[in-house]
Image (tube, grey):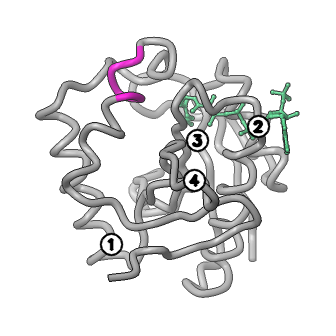
């Protein structure tokens, strides 16, 4: 079964499956990659994350996808479109988390930019957001590079995050 949802020059974004636990554990067990999250995630929490993602595919036609190198199939990270509650309203967020060995190659920007196109194109969304921690410079740079604009700082997950958005 072809699970690829989006293809870019260097990358395939494919549907996540339960046997991606090991791939995702590379990111979720890394304290540096998880610096702006409440904690690292163990195997059980990673399985819940995959279940939440598979539910999102059913409920929203989108979720986080696994990002792989097209030429080698190597796992690089996850990127996609996920629901987030902002002021009581569900907004769709472009999210990205990559394995540390893959940072600094433009992969997150390439994947997130393709998700933005997919959200406005195939999914016909009128707005997309991004919610980087105010101190997460790498993440803020990705949001800016894909053409998102900072609206304001909000409190989410008990911390200050920047609300970036883009309109179709
Ligand atoms: C946020 C995150 C995905 C950003 O990763 P990143 O590697 O910095 O971002 P990109 O993949 O877009 O790479 C950009 C860098 O690659 C460089 N680069 C190298 N080759 C490139 C190429 N061929 N094309 C484009 N950029 C390239 C760019 O110059 C840029 O360098 P800079 O950081 O010095 O400006 C990563 O830090 C991460 O996974 N963090 C942990 C999870 C997290 O915090 N997620 C965000 C939650 S909101």
121 sits to left or right of 154:
right
In the image, residue 139 sits, relative to residue 52, either above or below, namely above
Q: Is mark 3 within 8 Å of ligand 1?
A: yes
The kind of secondary structure element at disc 3 is: loop
Q: Earlier along the polypeptide chain: callout 2 or callout 4?
A: 4
Q: Which residue carries the number 1 mark?
A: 57
Along the line of sight, the residue nearer the viewer: 111 or 11: 11
Ligand 1 - quadrant of the structure image? top right
The magenta region covers 26-30
Q: Position of residue 76 (x, y in %)?
A: 54, 42
Q: Is mark 4 within 8 Å of ligand 1?
A: no
Q: Earlier along the polypeptide chain: callout 4 or callout 1?
A: 1
Spatial distance from mark 4 to mark 3, Cα to Cα?
Answer: 31 Å
Q: Earlier along the polypeptide chain: callout 2 or callout 3?
A: 2
Mark 3, other Cα within 10 Å: few <14 / some 14–19 / many ≥20: many
CB atoms at circles 4 and 1 under 8 Å apart?
no
Q: Which mark is residue 72?
A: 4
- Residue at point 73% right, 23% down? 137
Q: Position of residue 123 (x, y in %)?
A: 55, 83
Spatial distance from mark 2 to mark 1, Cα to Cα?
Answer: 28 Å
Q: Which residue carries the number 2 mark?
A: 105
């Amino acid at each position: 079964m072809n699970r690829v949802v989006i293809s870019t020059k260097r990358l395939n974004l494919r549907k996540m499956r339960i046997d991606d636990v090991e791939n995702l554990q590379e990111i979720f067990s890394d304290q540096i990659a998880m610096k702006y999250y409440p904690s690292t995630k163990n195997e059980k929490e990673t399985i819940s994350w995959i279940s939440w993602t598979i539910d999102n595919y059913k409920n929203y036609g989108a979720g986080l996808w696994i990002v792989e190198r097209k030429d080698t199939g190597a796992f690089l990270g996850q990127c996609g479109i996920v629901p987030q509650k902002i002021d009581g309203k569900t907004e769709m967020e472009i999210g990205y988390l990559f394995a540390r060995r893959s940072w600094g190659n433009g992969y997150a920007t390439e994947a997130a930019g393709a998700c933005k196109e997919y959200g406005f194109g195939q999914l016909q969304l009128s707005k997309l957001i991004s919610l980087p921690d105010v101190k997460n410079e790498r993440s803020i740079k990705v949001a800016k590079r894909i053409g998102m604009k900072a609206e304001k700082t909000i409190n989410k997950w008990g911390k200050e995050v920047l609300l970036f958005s883009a309109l179709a």
